[in-house]
Image (cartoon, rainbow, N blue to C red):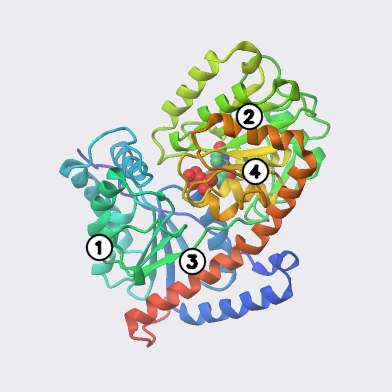
Amino acid sequence: MSVEGHGRMREVAVQAIDAARLEPLIGAARMEQYLAEAERARELFAGRAVVSVNSTAAGGGVAELLQSLLAYARGAGVDARWLVIDGDPAFFAITKRIHNWIYGTPGDGGPLGETERAHYEAVAARNAQELRALVRPGDVVLLHDPQPAGLAPALRALGVPVVWRCHIGCDVANEWTERAWAFLRRYVEPVDGIVVSHAGFAPPWADPARVHVIPPSIDPFSAKNQPLEPAQVRDALVYVGVLAGEADGPHVGFTRRDGSPGRINRHADVLQTGPPPPPDAPLVAQVSRWDRLKDMPGVMEAFAHHVDPSLGAHLLLAGPVVTGVADDPEGGAVLRDCIDRWRRLPHHARSRVHLACMPMADPDEQAAIVNALQRHASVVVQKSLAEGFGLTVSEAMWKERPVVGSAVGGIVDQIRDGEDGLLLPDPHDLAACGAAIERLLRDPLEAARLARNGHVRVRDEFLGDRHLERYASLFAQVVAARTGGGDAATAPR
Ligand code: UDP
């Protein structure tokens, strides 16, 4: 297989954001602690860059995370950069296979043999060639997920410390996880640090002394999470086509990550029988990539067959347009499967289930639409079959929405069952999923209690200051281990 034309890395511009804006949310004492850590990080990284490398600038949790986190790091005076690797469809089919295997599932059932390894390494080599011109030995490189893991040996050969962050994982090892780890081992085993989102996700061969558990975070000020008035929420959703009615005002505005104003100008691509849900009908929503492990069809069937129709609720399954996420080749097939199953639902159920594909051309606009959706939902569901962390869970909890989530991966680090939301012990149990949704719809006071607790939990554990402090301490260890505690920073760039 040729990799001609592929391998050009792209740098994503990152705005500096001052974390001081978090202070009203986290309080003065926590802010002071953050500022002290930021000071130490500035000293450590004087003359160095921290370069994050992943495989997409938009769509999915990693891109969502990097946008805010790197902006706060830059705001703290650290030269945090973001590069996106390039690959061809065959490369992304291979990395999606690895991704599915790390989740303990067979994915497309294809092989990961020497042919696939050769192609994976050829794409990695081309990207590494570009990366060589962009990093220097004093820098630290943070590779995200399996796609750029193949760049680690070339970076290490340059003397650059490498940390590999794996955002995905599986609670129970099986033949697929073993095969995925066997594939990645030669690239990742020697790196300076491995970061996982959830305890127990580390590869079995990883040196425990080099494994760090760092959960992700959300940014309360991003277009995805910033406050919206109820009227804005309704107008936005009417405009994009997922709620019935007439929008009152002009297109809903939001603040972009660079601080400039934006407006919702695009419509969603919505599949439904009859009109969109009325604004006053309870809405159950799952927002996910069209990925088998998110089990959108399972949510649909749990809702259609196990939630009492007399409650008048509607279900919205929302994901990106299927051409919108470059590194996710399975989206089209999963969406088609959802549509097929939707067509087979009895008419009365089908008219209460709506499938929406979000416009992805403008990531901030897309985020603002998801924000409105999550805020409008009476219940947010994340019925994943496996999950690294599940940012959608924290996003909904932050918005004081009651969440029903599977008890898998990082979701259990966010929701404490019956305290901050409801957990589904068996994510395949459709009746239990329907019952949990129904319980929240029938008992708004209990739903509100869980939702309030959820907000506090996210404030305490999953905002950016906590996340950056954990990274700063990891990088300090990595740099100290490389330099024997001394300072190896190179001359100013
Ligand atoms: N997301 C989005 N639009 C979509 C689907 C998902 O903006 O149509 C966002 C979602 O709000 C969250 C991220 O993508 O911020 C998904 O992260 P998560 O950790 O839940 O799952 P991942 O996609 O990384 O497996």
Q: What is the crowding at mark 3: few (fewer than 14 residues within 10 Å), some, or many (at least 20)? A: many
Inspect the image, locate mark 3, and give the three-letter code of the amino acid beneath it.
Ala
Residue at the disc numbered 4: 403
Residue type, numbered disc 2: Leu
Q: CA distance from mark 2 to mark 4?
A: 14 Å
Which comes before the other along the chain, label 2 or label 4? 2
Q: CA distance from mark 2 to mark 3?
A: 37 Å
Locate the C terminus by quadrant. Answer: bottom left
Q: Position of residue 31 (x, y in %)?
A: 68, 73
Residue at the far top in the pictured view = 347
> Label 3, on which residue?
80
Q: Dividing the image into 4 quarters, which one contains the N terminus?
A: top left
Taking the image as shown, residue 403 lies to the left or right of residue 490, namely: right
**Mark 2 or 3, which is nearer the eye?**
2
Q: Secondary structure at mark 4?
A: strand
Cβ atoms under marks 3 and 1 closer than 8 Å: no
- Along the line of sight, the residue nearer the viewer: 105 or 192: 105
Mark 2 or mark 1, earlier in chain:
1
Residue with the mark numbered 2: 316
